[in-house]
Image (cartoon, helix red, strand yellow):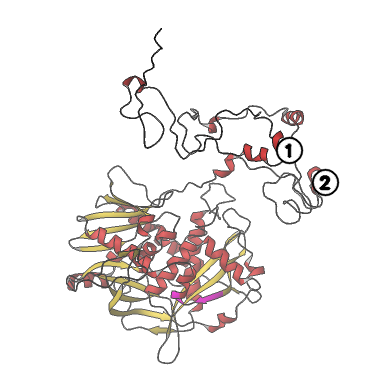
Amino acid sequence: MSELPSFTLPQVFDNPKGWGPTPQSPAALGDIPYDLYSKGDKVNRVANWINPNDSRDHRDGGRGRGRRDHVQQTYGSNSASAFAYQAEEDEESFSLVADRGAAGANKKIGIRAVPSGGRGGARGGARGGRGGRGMQRLGGGRGGGPGGRGGGFRRRFGWRDFDRGHHRFASVKPTDDWELVQEIEFNRMSGLSFLANEARSLGTYGSVGVYDHLYDRVNTKLERPLKAASGVRLNVTASQDPVLNNLASSDSSVKVFATDTVIATLMASMVSTGAWDVVANRVGDRLFFDKRDGGPLDYPSVNENAAEPPSDSSEKEAGINSASMLAGEARDVNCSYISQITAKGSIQLEHPNPFNQDNADTVDHAAYRYRILDFSAKAGEDDDEPQQQQQEGDRCLMAIRTEISGYIPSGKNNKQLFLRALTQHDITAQGAGGALDWRQKLDSQRGAVIATEMKNNSSKLARWAFQAVLAKADQLRIGFVARATPRDRSRHAVLGFQSYNPSDFVQQLSLSEYKAWGIVKALVDLCLGLEEGKYVIMRDPNKPLILIYRVPFNSFEDDAEEGDEEDGENEGDSNAAAAD
């Protein structure tokens, strides 16, 4: 009897974590590519004898079963394929050489243009319909939108329609001698919370204007022209403030010195989209938060958070509506607006203006309140309420200068105002952000106008709200100022105003004072831990990052001298215009 053939069972290597070779596999199988599969994948059939091109299942009467088979999960679909095709060339390098015969090609394969719908859609393709515009990407109104009364054909969105990001430029360009010290992502600061309590007040300085109640009755039908400001409202940085310098030399417990402009910018950093920078000077155990003269903190942005913000353009027609020109226009409008509506009188505060003593040529018409805040507590994460102070040992105090825009006389206690103005240039220009015409909609649709401004200028409004909170203002009053004509940036008119309680307005902007103070506290602690020197805290213009650079001591000195020369020229021009 012949022996039966023998069969030896080979060694099986089990992979308990999934499909694929194991570390104990033979070395000969090491270079063989394989696709990772998950044991949770569904195995439908060992062999599929159904025609994949036929979506009907004859055993099921052709109902339902075919559609279920068509969408059933394929074996191995839960894991990423290692054999997926990777395009080596960038698709952006593709360009169409000639499009002749494209219409004929569409006819051959049966593609036809689909009318945009609605009454007159077919006719609109040939002659534009009633108010149509031929080809349109996004329709609107009566003549060309999807479902409108006429107009053109609807263009399909392509892959290029999703790549419409606007490249922004940094407020200051880092050089080779700058050293990157820290890089902070926005999501790391979202869980911080802190509350800076007031330790004591240093009093008020300067003289403040009295609000004119005549502007309570201003509306779109009774608009008042805006006159150019006759005085100057300075915005001196912290290291050049004589009050703060005297405090630094006399009180060793005060470690940090800043102005409301800088602190409000840091508090609103989470909603900012434009570039900004703050200079941090570490001198001994002190920290000065400064701004650059002529930098972005001196010019309020316009439509910074819009889907298509204004951009700097070299074209002559777009010059007056560029981002830089609009920012300069907004600065002049705010100065003129504050001076005009507080021209009914003047109230002298506790101390004289500190900036009018040494410089008699330039008279500062602004008023200030100096406060000292306690930063001794530690900021906690993921807490809606601030943590209490843990120790009463080493105290960290911050001295801050805030602005008082105006007073409303009310018996013994005058109401303190913080005044600012929103500007409207040309609603048809690029960067208008889809704003409504204020002259037509401000009185009848005020809520829609304010909602649009909160969307397009959320960063600027957040800064104003935090500045009002820092100044302990009783009321934040925002005016609406529009150009007299869209193409003339020198003439404006006051159309109305809106008043808010500063703390309530912060909540309307979906912001939190606790979280905003947490960001400032984290940056203060970080800067106090750095070595002596000059640093720049800047927002990355295209990524949600805050970058901290160590820079040479002589940085920005040339810019300050150029800014002083430009300010002198601007003052001369304004004085000449006032004389005319």
In the displayed orientation, state which residue is furthest to the top.
1
What is the number of the mark on residue 460? none
Relative to 281, 383 lies left or right: right
Q: 158 or 533: nearer the eye?
A: 158
Q: Is residue 411 visible?
A: yes
Q: Which residue is drawn at 70% across and 54% down?
A: 140
Relative to 281, 115 lies left or right: right
**294 shown above or below 233:** above
Q: Nearer the viewer, mark 1 or mark 2?
A: 1
Q: Quadrant of residue 432?
A: bottom right
**146 shown above or below 351:** above
What is the number of the mark on residue 123? 2
Q: How far apart are marks 1 and 2 (CA)?
A: 45 Å
Write the start and end of the magenta stretch as one range.
Answer: 497-503
Label 2 packing within 10 angstroms: few (<14), some (14-19), many (20+):
some
Q: Where is residue 123 in the image (x, y as percent from the top left)?
A: 82, 46
Label 1 packing within 10 angstroms: few (<14), some (14-19), many (20+):
few
**136 shown above or below 429:** above
Q: 511 or 273: nearer the eye?
A: 511
Hey, what amino acid is under mark 1?
Answer: Gly
Q: In which quarter of the image is the N terminus?
A: top left
Considering only order in the chain, which callout, 2 or 1, is on the residue closer to the N terminus? 1
Hey, what amino acid is under mark 2?
Answer: Arg
Q: 86 or 268: nearer the eye?
A: 86
Q: Which residue is drawn at 51% across and 38% down?
A: 42
Q: Position of residue 304 (x, y in %)?
A: 49, 57
Q: Name the residue under label 1.
A: 61
Residue 411 located within the stretch drawn in magenta: no
Relative to 380, 531 lies left or right: left
Q: Where is residue 95 in the image (x, y as percent from the top left)?
A: 59, 30
